[in-house]
């Protein structure tokens, strides 16, 4: 059985039978904590296997993002055999340009999941649309449309870690009670957040370099303006290898963050999960990963355990073959949307009828709102911009908003400051099964974003007043100020202690678990993946200790 590489339409097609771990190093739990980033692209590491029809596994993990990777590593270290099933590609093979991923300014077939046109988050410039046609392909970024909101998600081995900005933020301790009320905060802050930060390889930009490099002029403008309006500007940790970025600056290594690479993947410096948890999981020898395999069903097996059905896809999204495997335990780690969609359908079509009514509830957008400001002519933000954000404006307590000072790496001077705000928007939507369309719907309403806009304005109205500046109205349409139709941070849908017990065991079934962002009820007050990782570390420890 073979899978297809990301050589692209007409590109190389590789046959892979077993994964090969490039470095051969075996990272245990302790070694993972002392992780240091590889300086090269993921190329050279071959991940993929292709699970056999009829196979049996002790643990099957659906999805290879943060929750799935933590589960796979810790289960494998406990001696459990794990099969990871991933609908996206392996992203371990360069295309004909020698790169695994394309950059933001020239999105190609690798950019979007099964779209024929790009759907850029900043989709206009000077009022002109910038989306373009692309070949339909199993690209790395999914812009999944629901009524009222587009949910951006990573597709491939590594999930969201392939496409995100790497901002690795531990929430303020005082906000934690509102994020996960049933979880012991002392344990999280003493044990699991530190473990997650170590495992992910989180670090901070060198402030001296930040203060002088052209690549962060945009962020220094953001800091200056926050200061002048009386808002705290905070440096935000990231999983990018900051030493590598300095070398990018001096031209001694291939550029990645400094070459407009981020939301369609990053070829070199970012420590995606492929370089951290997944590498360590594969090095145990107990984990296989099958890319381009999409789980479609989970049901009780007659003699115990579960039957899992899946479709193997080609790079156009067609089903090559369908497979049936069995597993003693199944971990749903398909991301907030993927896990919620699967569980709602399985409950409401009668495959897992004992799932409770909380499944599908409490979904939120982490209050995401995007906006641009037009700076004065004497405040250029720079033609050179690193794609990796490293700072934010914190007005959470007073105004309900934390604004990431985001890059706009257009390659030319724009005088624009771009922000992705996380706001304390309390609206929560619900996933429901639509028997007519045979799809899962989401009840999100676009008007709900107005609450987020109001909170974001608590920061930007004041900055505009202080600076004598205005909002940009040309970045998200014509005369459109706010991008109020997207989220990068889907959270909830199978919430901890409601749809599951307090450690992610699904109510109604033994041996079924949720271990991803679906557990978190809609908001983390900051960027979410450190919390998703830390919660997964906490839950899997309890599951391994108690569930045999
Ligand atoms: P996730 O990472 O989404 O992994 C789920 C995996 O399951 C994916 O690989 C899917 O392809 C796969 N999957 C789904 N359905 C199936 C199925 N049926 N069968 C097999 N596989 C399936 O889940 N967060 C931060 O903290 N900091 C940031 O700077 C940041 N920037 C972001 C920028 C962008 C553009 C985006 C899209 C997200 C960003 N995020 C950021 C959010 C972050 O990546 C996200 O919260 C996590 O990736 C969610 O982790 P999960 O483990 O829940």
Image (cartoon, rainbow, N blue to C red):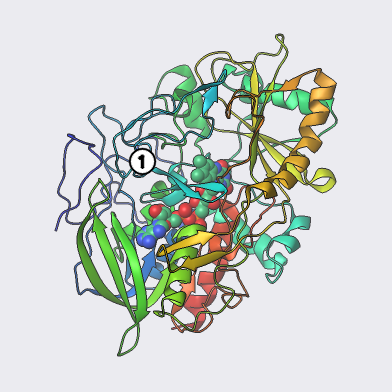
From the viewer's side, name the closer residue of 331 and 400: 400
**How many neighbours does mark 1 have within 10 angstroms: few (below 14), some (14-19), or many (20 or more)?**
many
Q: Does residue 197 sit above or below 11 in this rendering?
A: below
Can residue 326 be seen here? The reply is yes
Estimate the x, y position of residue 49 in percent, counting from the top left: 23, 58
At 59% across and 74% down in the image, what residue appears?
A: 358
Q: Quadrant of the N terminus?
A: bottom left
Is 241 above or below relative to 494?
above
- The reply to whether the residue tagged 1 has its Cβ within 8 angstroms of ligand 1 is no
x 46%, y 70%: residue: 343
The outermost residue toward the bottom is 303
Q: Position of residue 31 (x, y in %)?
A: 45, 55
Is 375 on the left or on the right of 250, as rendered?
right
**Can the viewer see residue 66?**
no
Find the residue positioned furthest to the top.
378
> For the residue labelled by badge 1, is the local secondary structure a helix, a strand or a loop?
loop
Q: Is residue 260 found left or right of 9 in the rendered image?
A: right
- Residue furthest out toward the front: 436
> Residue 250: image x %, image y %?
47, 18
- On the picture, is 528 further left or further right than 178? left
Question: How many marks are shown on the rendered structure?
Answer: 1
Q: In this view, does 299 lie to the left or right of 485?
A: left
Quarter of the image with the C terminus in it: bottom left
* Whether residue 46 is situated above or below residue 411 in the rendered picture: below
**Residue 210 placed where, x, y %?**
63, 25
**Residue labelled with disc 1:** 115
Q: Which residue occupies the foreground of this view, 199 or 413?
A: 413
- Of the pair 71 and 483, the residue shown nearer to us: 483
């Amino acid at each position: 059985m073979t899978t297809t590489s990301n050589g692209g339409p007409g590109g190389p097609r590789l046959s892979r039978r077993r994964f090969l771990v490039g470095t051969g190093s075996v990272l245990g739990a302790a070694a993972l904590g002392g992780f240091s980033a590889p300086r090269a692209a993921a190329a050279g590491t071959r991940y993929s296997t292709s699970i056999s029809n009829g196979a049996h596994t002790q643990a099957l993990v659906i999805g290879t993002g943060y929750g799935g990777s933590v589960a796979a590593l810790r289960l494998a270290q406990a001696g459990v055999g794990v099969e990871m099933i991933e609908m996206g590609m392996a992203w371990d093979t360069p295309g004909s340009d020698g790169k695994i991923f394309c950059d933001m300014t020239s999105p190609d077939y690798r950019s979007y999941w099964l779209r024929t046109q790009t759907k850029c988050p900043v989709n206009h410039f000077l009022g002109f649309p910038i989306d373009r046609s692309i070949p339909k392909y199993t690209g790395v970024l999914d812009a999944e449309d629901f009524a009222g909101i587009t949910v951006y998600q990573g597709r491939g081995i590594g999930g969201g870690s392939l496409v995100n900005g790497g901002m690795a933020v531990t929430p303020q301790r005082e906000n934690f009670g509102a994020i996960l009320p049933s979880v012991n905060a002392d344990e999280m802050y003493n044990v699991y957040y530190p473990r997650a930060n170590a495992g992910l390889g989180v670090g901070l930009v060198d402030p001296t370099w930040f203060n002088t490099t052209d690549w962060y002029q945009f962020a220094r403008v953001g800091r200056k303006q926050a200061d002048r309006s009386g808002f705290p500007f905070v440096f935000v940790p990231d999983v990018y290898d900051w030493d590598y970025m300095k070398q990018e600056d001096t031209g001694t290594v291939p550029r990645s963050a400094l070459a407009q690479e981020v939301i369609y993947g990053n070829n070199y410096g970012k420590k995606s999960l492929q370089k951290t948890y997944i590498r360590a999981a594969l090095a145990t020898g107990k984990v296989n990963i099958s890319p381009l395999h999409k789980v479609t069903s989970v049901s009780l097996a007659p003699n115990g355990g579960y039957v899992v059905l899946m479709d193997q896809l080609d790079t156009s999204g067609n089903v090559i073959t369908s497979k049936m495997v069995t597993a003693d335990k199944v971990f749903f780690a398909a991301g907030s949307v993927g896990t919620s969609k699967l569980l709602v359908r399985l409950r409401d079509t009668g495959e897992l009828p004992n799932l409770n009514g909380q499944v599908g509830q409490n979904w939120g957008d982490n209050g995401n709102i995007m906006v641009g400001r037009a700076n004065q002519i004497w405040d250029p933000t720079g033609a050179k911009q690193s794609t990796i954000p490293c700072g934010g404006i914190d007005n959470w307590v007073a105004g309900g908003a934390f604004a990431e000072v985001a890059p706009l790496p257009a390659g030319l001077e724009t005088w624009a400051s771009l922000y992705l705000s996380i706001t304390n928007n309390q609206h929560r939507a619900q996933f429901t099964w639509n028997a007519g369309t045979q799809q899962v719907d989401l009840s999100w309403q676009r008007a709900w974003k107005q609450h987020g806009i109001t909170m974001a304005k608590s920061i930007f109205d004041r900055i505009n007043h202080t600076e004598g500046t205005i909002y940009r109205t040309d970045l998200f349409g014509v005369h459109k100020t706010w991008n109020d139709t997207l989220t990068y941070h889907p959270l909830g849908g199978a919430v901890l202690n409601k749809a599951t017990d307090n450690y992610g065991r699904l109510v109604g079934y033994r041996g079924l678990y949720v271990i991803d962002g679906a557990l978190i009820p809609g908001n983390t007050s900051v960027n979410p993946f450190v919390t998703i990782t830390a919660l997964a570390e906490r839950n899997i420890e309890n599951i391994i200790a108690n569930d045999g």
